[in-house]
Amino acid sequence: MNANKTLGTGEKEKGLKRKDDKAYLRRRRILGILSLVVVVLLVGVVTYFVCTDLLGKIRTPEEFRNYIESFGWTGRLVLLGLQCLQVVIALIPGEIIEVGAGYAFGPVEGTLLCMGGVAIASAIIFLLVKRLGIKLVEVFVSREKINELRFINSEKKLKRTIFVLFFIPGTPKDLFTYFAGLTRIKLSEFLVISLIARIPSVVSSTIGGHIINQENYLSAIILFAVTGAVSLIGMWAYNKIVKYHEGREPKEKKGKGIEQTNRK
């Protein structure tokens, strides 16, 4: 009798535990969905108002500087915010903000402000992706692009691969920021690696903006022409890397993508 009672009690406890686990998972799923909705709405609202304001006031680097200076001492915070927004949206070319920063604040301060904005946005995106998973990534990045980058997660030399991809000019660096949250790399490691790799690209853009401000247009044309040529080479190299890894994939794994990488 005692044995039967003990067995019955154990089964009841297991049943209650399973119910508690299901309730916990349900609450976590609901919280995740609500968090995702809030993030998307917030980004959408900020993007709408900021972009509407900018499109109406900014058409040249000089207008960008005047726009930033109109905020007084808080202009630097505005630039930080614009750089953060650019990284979050991922579709806006970062060079636009970087050239404007160099024009408004010079190559040194402009670079520091841009790097600060990139660091803040990268950390926020990384942590949100770790928390909400691939569903958040798919809001800003197409599944096709995510699958295109899946070779990074299976790469043995993950850190080196991330550095190279962020260092090569012309690669979709902001898309890599979203994808990094789906990999096993730590936030501190990712920030150090990606920020160091971004420095040459940001510096060249802010220097270009400063040169335009100095009205040295010939030097600016040469700099941007060289940067553009290097970026085209970088884009070609990146496409070659992607195709190379796609060719190495076993046929049975093709099409699966990254959906199993970070399931919640």
Image (cartoon, grey):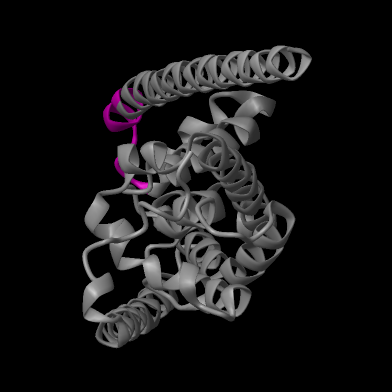
Q: Within the magenta stretch, is there residue 68? A: no
The answer to whether residue 63 shows anywhere in this view is no
Q: Position of residue 179 (x, y in %)?
A: 45, 55
Determine the residue positioned at 27% across, 27% down.
Answer: 56
- Eyeballing the image, is 32 above or below 120? above
Quadrant placement of the N terminus: top right
Q: Main secondary structure of the magenta part?
A: helix
Determine the residue positioned at 21% across, 64% down.
Answer: 255
Which picture quadrant has residue 240?
bottom left
Q: Position of residue 196 (x, y in %)?
A: 66, 69
Q: Nearer the viewer, residue 25 or 154?
A: 25
Q: Nearer the viewer, residue 65 or 19?
A: 19
Total marks in image: 0
Residue reaching furthest right? Answer: 2
Determine the residue positioned at 38% across, 48% down.
Answer: 90
- Eyeballing the image, is 194 above or below 245? above
Which picture quadrant has residue 226?
bottom left
Question: Horizontally, is 78 left or right of 52 in the view?
Answer: right
Residue reaching furthest front? Answer: 1
Q: The magenta stretch spans which residues?
A: 52-60
- Eyeballing the image, is 140 above or below 110? above
Q: Position of residue 132 (x, y in %)?
A: 49, 34
Q: Nearer the viewer, residue 217 or 185?
A: 185
Determine the residue positioned at 56% across, 31% down.
Answer: 78
The answer to whether residue 50 shows anywhere in this view is yes
Question: Horizontally, is 43 left or right of 126 in the view?
Answer: left
Question: Horizontally, is 25 left or right of 222 in the view?
Answer: right
